Amino acid sequence: MTLSSGPVTSKSATDKVSVAERLFVALDYPDAASALSVAEKLAPLGVSYKVGMQLFYAAGMSVVRQLQPYGKKVFVDLKLHDIPNTVAGAVDSLVRQGVEFLNVHTQGGPEMMQAAVDAAYKAADAIGKPAPKLIAVTLLTSLSERHVREFLFVESASAQEYVQHLALQAKKCGMHGVVCSAQEAALIRKACGPDFLLVTPGIRPSGTDTQDQQRVITPAQALKNDSDYLVVGRPITGAADPLSAARGIVEEMRGALGGATE
Ligand code: C5P
């Protein structure tokens, strides 16, 4: 893959989004109090937040609502994956309660993704709100080329080709974007166009521990590869000073975007 070297050019999908808002801090905590205490510390930065399974199953929609005043966006990352009717019902419930950024798993198949898209538009219409951003998970960033070959048993494609294929399927089903590794972002951007949202976890500032992530990349390189949104958890939430860790990442992002002031 060829990587661009200079500052990132602006794209329509995130043109009006501030640099800090393009950082989703993954609040993987067991209770609302821990998540809200970090959100309070990070409030001066104006970052966005991601509520995943651990926090959502412990604290539900109540913590999503409580986070909304602290963050620009709140991404509810439940990676819905079930039969079309069940996923449509789950999307309906989430959107009717005000969720504006959520995801399903591509592995649920095209009918499931289409059912999710239909449900999202209908639910938003019913409550008089704009349609939410519906994002499809491709291949988890904790899985490597070896998993694709030996576990998923995909022999005919590399991990990048496999992810590109899933992204194109997601786009065809009407999804607004995908979760992928920023290592594949440039390739997916080329295949899926400028408005398709690329949300990329597996971000590790240089010198930090990769932990269970495999396909990792730095914040600056993720933006140079054309990611729209970066998802960062433990490098911020596990730091002695989360505000300073998050500020460092936002500064690195600003540098990669050519010193954007917003
Ligand atoms: O702590 P860390 O930065 O590794 O957190 C990454 C976050 O992104 C976690 O909340 C994880 O659930 C999420 N995620 C991921 N890979 C995906 C999709 C989501 O790591 N493909």
Image (cartoon, rainbow, N blue to C red):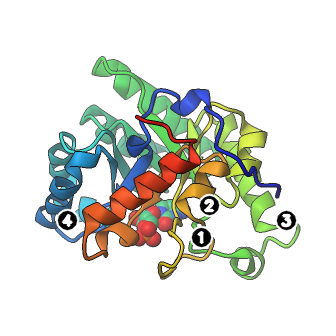
User: In the rendered view of the protein, which quadrant contains the N terminus?
Assistant: bottom right
- Residue at image mark 3: 157
> For numbered disc 3, what is the local secondary structure?
loop
Which is nearer the N-term, disc 4 or disc 2?
4
Disc 4 under 8 Å from ligand 1? The reply is: no
What residue sits 59% from the left and 70% below the top? Answer: 216
* Picture coordinates of residue 168, whole percent (x, y): 73, 43
Q: Residue furthest right?
A: 156
Tell me the distance, in whole angstroms, between the alpha carbons under discs 1 and 2: 7 Å
Amino acid carrying mark 3 in the image: Ala
Tell me the distance, in whole angstroms, between the alpha carbons under discs 4 and 1: 28 Å
Amino acid carrying mark 4 in the image: Ala
Q: Nearer the viewer, mark 4 or mark 1?
A: 1
Label 4: few (<14), some (14–19) or many (≥20) C-alpha neighbours in 10 Å:
few
- Residue at image mark 1: 216
Q: Nearer the viewer, residue 53 or 141?
A: 141
> For numbered disc 1, what is the local secondary structure?
loop
- Residue at image mark 4: 58
User: In the rendered view of the protein, which quadrant contains the C terminus?
Assistant: top left
* Picture coordinates of residue 253, whole percent (x, y): 50, 51
Label 3: few (<14), some (14–19) or many (≥20) C-alpha neighbours in 10 Å:
some
What residue sits 51% from the left and 61% below the top? Answer: 201
Q: Quadrant of residue 226?
A: top right
In this rendering, is residue 150 above or below 254? below
Which is nearer the N-term, disc 1 or disc 2?
2
Amino acid carrying mark 1 in the image: Val
- Residue at image mark 2: 181
Tell me the distance, in whole angstroms, between the alpha carbons under discs 3 and 1: 20 Å
Instruction: Identify the mark at residue 93; answer none if there is no mark.
Output: none
Which is nearer the N-term, disc 3 or disc 1?
3
